[in-house]
Amino acid sequence: MGQPLISVIIPAYNARTFISAAVESVLAQTHPAVEVIVVDDGSTDRTLDALAAFQGRIRSLRQPNRGPAAARNAGLALAGGEYVMFLDADDWILPDKLRRQVACLAGTLAVGWVFCDVVYVDRSGRHLFRASERFAYARRARLDGDLFSELLPGNFIPVHAPLFRRRCLAEVGPFDEDPRLIGVEDWDLLLRLSVSAPAAYIPDVLAACVLHPGSLSADPVVRDLRRRTFRTCWQPASCIP
């Protein structure tokens, strides 16, 4: 019996200078069955030209600029994998991430998704801190099972930390493309998913997140503004059975 296919979807906007590292990290995975789908979301810096070296090993498409949620949804529509992961174009994953996460999900059908710890780095690759440190994992009531109550106050799981069962994503629908949710669209998805699909947690660092000056991840003021905006336009009751 062959290995299950994993679809890794990479939305990209003006990512020419760093997207190769993201793609290479996926192609270097120890899990042998991986498809890479890059969605160029209206870049003006010839992002797709940077992918020429990967011709024949990845799939790519271009669309008018519509934001990360729309780009991820476009990639998801093309994905053929039993499992799905979303990777931002300036981040990367460690070689064993997908193999270990697939093994975790294969161990129990009751779990719909599994996430790992993530290290945050600066542009030079210098380690800054872990997600588990930044979001105080040690003080949380739980990191597996039903995570809705843990996620409701705020998202603590970077977008590329989880691996999802495709069927679980299909049950809750795609990313919400409302422009007011840009920057928190992954939080919205995890909240909806956590209602119906229990999670598992691998406490090892299996991915890296690059903090750029002025980025949403690096700026707590902008991040808090996005969260407050999200709370005004999201209806919790709509996803609670």
Image (cartoon, rainbow, N blue to C red):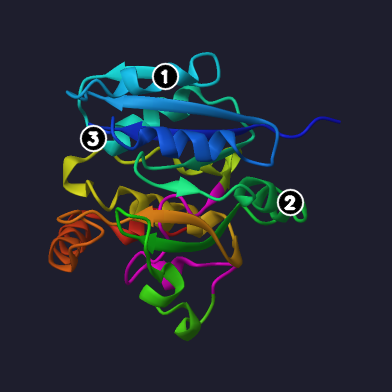
Mark sitting on residue 103: 2
36 w.r.t. 148: above or below:
above
Task: Name the residue that disc number 3 marks.
Answer: 67
Res. 81 visible in picture: yes
Residue type, label 2: Ala
Label 1 sits on a secondary structure element that is: strand
Label 3 sits on a secondary structure element that is: loop
Report the front residue among 148 and 32. Answer: 32
Q: Magenta region: which residues?
A: 143-163
Query: Residue placed at 69% from the left, 40% from the top?
Result: 31
| Residue found at the very far bottom of the displayed protein | 139
Report the front residue among 87 and 182. Answer: 87
Residue 236, x across and y down, in percent? 33, 60
Q: Is residue 142 left or right of residue 99?
A: left
Look at the image and say whether residue 119 sits in the magenta stretch: no
Residue type, label 3: Gly
Distance between the Cα atoms at labels 2 and 3? 32 Å
What crowding class fits label 2: few (fewer than 14 Cα within 10 Å), some (14-19), or many (20 or more)? few
Residue 233, x across and y down, in percent? 19, 54
| Residue found at the very far top of the displayed protein | 56
Residue 230, x across and y down, in percent? 21, 57
Distance between the Cα atoms at labels 1 and 2? 28 Å
Query: Residue placed at 30% from the left, 48% from the top?
Result: 185
